[in-house]
Amino acid sequence: MFLKKQLNPELEAFFKYSGINSSDDTLFKESILRDQVYEESDFSDKSDSDNACNIFANDELIDKEIEKNPVISRIIGRSERIKKLRRSIFCVKDKNCKILITGESGTGKSLAAHILHDSGLLKDKQLISVNVGAIQKDLIESTLFGSVRGAFTDAVDRKGLMTLADGGVLFLDEIAELPLSCQPKLLRVIEEGVYRRVGSDREEKIDCNFIFATNQNLKDLVRKKRFREDLYYRIAEFRIEVPSLRERKEDILLLAEYFLQESNSKSNIEKKYFTEEAKQKLLSYDWPGNIRELRTVVNVSTIYSQSEKILPGNIIF
């Protein structure tokens, strides 16, 4: 049995912000022993940038480091949930592991993925982003892995996103939409770094980092046999949760003001502001569409407002 007490302090800090329960024997073996992703050698470099987990014992210290990072500071908010999100990104940004970002629709998972890339060791390499749910299901395999001429009707020699991402980062959004038929192929890429184009018998190698995102509960999908359990544990080596807006209500006005300033900067008319009553209306709403909905509501309120004041009646949910 591999117990949490056997971890050194640096790994304890890593687990604190990874969302992984290190006392889970199965997951512990899967993420630590078999793949050696979080070996002690990963934390042996004592430089400020490569050994961030050393300072995670003190959240105040890590927050000061984040303030110096203009990329991670792009995440707006003062709530504890957002502070934890920034700390998680800071901890993992330079690590070679698979990252799963979870959260409701509209919370900013794509932004988190781009910040992970832009602040990490591969920031100068390409980031290939794709929404799996936006691809026609019968084209997902060829889109990801490429194809050769004649593999199927109208098939041509085509490079897939895997080829384009080689040497950089591949971000697969809405990974829960990946068909079961394609999941073994992705699993092999992650485990062995090789794949075949559709219709080809030649293996090609790939070396890239992976970021995944979903607004669904993958564990539930595993129980329902709609997502492979082995693939889940491979893509969820480090988990980051992006909170909903109702879980960070203290950030609502901060975000609303940011979007309003953004709108004001694009307008040649008078600069608008929220009245106190309008602010209270914003705070009283649950925001099921999260930040995406808030941004839309703010932009529309500037259209309805006939003066520099944005009134409660100008805010339409």
Image: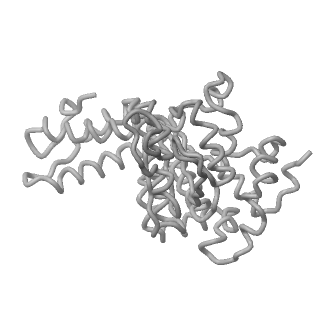
Q: Is residue 66 visible?
A: no
Q: Residue at x 88, y 48 (%)?
A: 3
Judge by depth and name the residue closer to the eye, 219 or 5: 219
Q: Is residue 22 visible?
A: yes
- What's the coloring here? one colour
| Residue depicted at x 28% and y 48% | 259
Residue 95: percent from left, percent from top: 63, 62
How far across and down, in percent of the image, does residue 83 sit? 53, 54
Q: Foreground: 269 or 150?
A: 150
Q: Position of residue 136 (x, y in %)?
A: 40, 32
Tell which residue pokes out farthest to the top in this image.
224
Q: Is residue 135 shown above or below 114?
A: above
Is 222 above or below relative to 63?
above
Residue beneath the point at 9% across and 42% down: 307
Vertical side of 310 occupied by 222: above or below: above
Q: Residue furthest front?
A: 150
Residue 56, how many percent across, how many down?
Answer: 67, 62
Q: Quadrant of the C terminus?
A: top left
Q: Quadrant of residue 9?
A: bottom right
164 w.r.t. 120: above or below: above
Q: How many marks?
A: 0
- The residue lying at 57 percent from left, 62 percent from top is 93
Q: Quadrant of the N terminus?
A: top right
